[in-house]
Image (cartoon, rainbow, N blue to C red):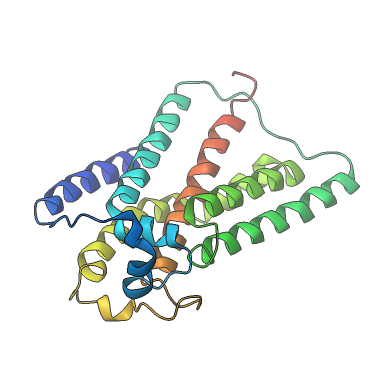
Amino acid sequence: MKKIPLFTTIISVVVVLVLSAFVVIVPHNANHYPLVTELYDGSANIVSAIYLDFRLYDTLFEVLIFSIAIVGVSMYASRVKESGKILADNSSLINFDLLFLSVVIILFGLYTVLTGHLQPGGAFSGGAITASGIVVLTMALGSEKIHKVVERSKLEWFENGVIMIILSYVMFADIPGGFFSPGFSIGNVGDFLSGRGALLLNGTIGFKVFVGGWLIFYEFSKRKESL
C-alpha cells in the first residue's frame, strides 16, 4: 500500500521525460501575458493562466515534488512507533465552535480551489486551506473518527491518480488538436466555465494537496508523543 505513491511518482517522471522529447518550447515575453491570456486561455487571473497553461510542466513537477515529500514523510513515520491520538475536547461549546469553524474553513478552501482562475487562489492554496479545516475538525471530533472516515473513503487511492489525470490532460487536451481539446474552451474572461482546463486542474491538484496535507497530519498525530 505504501509503495503505490512511490511507484506512481516514478512512472510519472518517466512519462514526463519521454514527453519532453516531443515538446517544442516557445519562448514567452512576460509583457505579453495579459494579451495571450485573453486570447488563448480565458482566465481572469493571469497567474492561474501561467501555472495551469503556459507553464503547466513546471506545475506538474511541483506536484511530483509534493508527492515525493508525502512518500518521504510516510516512510520515515513508519519507522517511528505509534504512541498517541488526538482526543475531542470535553467542552460541548468548544466542540461546537470547532465544528462550525472547520465547516467554514473547508467550504472556503473549496471556493478558493474552484475560483482560482477568476481571482487570487487556486489549487495549492485552496488544498492547504481545506486540509487545515480537517485538522480543526479532528480537534472537534477526535483523530480516530476522522481517520476512520477518511480511510474508508480510500482518498489515498484517488490522490495517487491525480498525476495521471494531469498527464492525460497534457497529452489529450492541452496540446492543440488533441482529442479532448474542444471540450476545454477558452470561454469569456470572468466566466466560471473559462480558463480551458482550469477547473479540472485546480480541482485535481487541490484534491491532491488536501489529501497530502491530511496524510502528513495523520502520520504526525499518531506519533505525537514520540516526536
Answer with left or right where residue 171 lies relative to residue 217: left
Answer with left or right where residue 57 lies relative to residue 145: left
* Residue 158 seen in this snapshot: yes
- Decide: is 76 above or below 130: above
| The C terminus sits in image quarter | top right
The residue drawn where x is 48% and y is 63% is 45
The residue drawn where x is 34% and y is 43% is 5
* Residue 1 seen in this snapshot: no
Q: Is 41 in front, or is 146?
A: 41
The residue drawn where x is 43% and y is 62% is 46
Numbered circles on residues, count? 0
Residue at the left extreme?
Answer: 21
> Residue 41 location in percent, x, y?
35, 70
Q: Is 209 in front, or is 226?
A: 209
Residue at the top extreme?
Answer: 226
Q: Is 224 in front, or is 19?
A: 19
> Residue 2 location in percent, x, y?
37, 38
The residue drawn where x is 46% and y is 78% is 193
Quarter of the image where one finds residue 188: bottom left
Answer with left or right where residue 144 lies relative to residue 77: right
Q: Is 130 in front, or is 126?
A: 126
- Decide: is 29 above or below 147: below
Quarter of the image where one finds residue 1: top left
> Residue 28 location in percent, x, y?
25, 56
Answer with left or right where residue 57 lies relative to residue 100: left
